[in-house]
Image (cartoon, grey):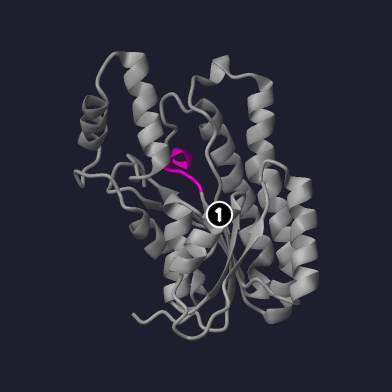
Amino acid sequence: MNIDLKGLNALVGGSTAGIGQAIAERLAAAGATVTLLARNEAKCKEVLNLLNKNIGQQHDYILADQTLPLILKETLDHYLADHSKTFHIVINNTGGPSPGPLHQAATSELEKAFSQHVIASHLIMQTCLPGMKKAGYGRIINVISTSVKAPLPNLGVSNTIRAAMANWSKTLATELAPFGITVNNILPGATDTDRLRSIIETKASKSGKSADEIRQEMIGEIPAGRFGLPREIAAAAVFLASPEAAYITGINVPVDGGRTPSL
């Protein structure tokens, strides 16, 4: 299948590392014009230089913090007004909450996570929606977690917020389908990123085991026998962003090597 995203603009959250960066790179390679959304300008410039520009795309970036959603919206409003641009593709992707048991989590942790994930994604959607409706084309893709289907141990706040994101997405998918806009979720399993390495180190420090022992235990739970690669998550995102996926909406797509124990 030859996926051609030429003429489409994509806004990619958390796009200076890991899965977000991989998605930005693969969207650009498929012909999309990519706008990075991240906090660190130096890293944005680094990633910008890596993006494919074979058809003359003018990629750029927006500096914003998804933990401050109202400021994020204001920044995005100004950007769209200045550039007269429509974002046809929105990738909602941001850092996950800290690990830990849910019963020990402070309410402030839940509030912060809800704001960073659900509220920020909602404001991004509302800001980009008029352009999508006018274009008759929209793809809202949320990078969440397999915990949507089966909660993961010691990720209490994350499990809670990811489920909220999934139901937000499903509701939107029903509402926006008549406008040619799809809303889908990608559920990465254990993927070889800095976040996974941080989780492994945390588990190791609390268990008294070595990081390598924890790593092997986690791999042992995956039927594919390895961690995923960011580019493999990105491949799913590029397909869902394409015209070929126009009749797919409101679904969760696990990309996890078979680890999730449910359908």
Q: Left of 124 or right of it: where is 82?
A: right
Tell me, yes or no, whether the highlighted magenta stretch contains residue 10: no
Q: Identify the residue shown where x is 79% and y is 62%.
A: 77
Q: Is residue 240 visible?
A: no
Residues drawn in magenta: 144-149
Q: Amino acid at mark 1?
A: Ala
Q: Name the residue nearer the viewer: 245 or 200.
A: 200
Q: Where does label 1 land, which residue?
A: 42
Is residue 188 at all visible to an observer of this figure? Answer: yes
Q: Residue at x 69, y 62 (%)?
A: 175
Q: Within the image, what quadrant is residue 110 found in?
A: top right
Vertical placement of 159 versus 57: above or below?
Answer: above
Look at the picture and state if 20 lies above or below 161.
Answer: below
Q: Is residue 171 left or right of residue 96?
A: right
Q: Secondary structure at mark 1?
A: helix
Image quadrant where residue 4 sits: bottom left
Q: Return the x and y of residue 180 as percentages of the image width and height.
A: 63, 75
Residue furthest front as drawn: 42
Residue 233 rendering spot, x and y as whole percentages: 38, 56
The N terminus appears in which quarter of the rendering?
Answer: bottom left
Furthest toward the bottom, the residue is 55
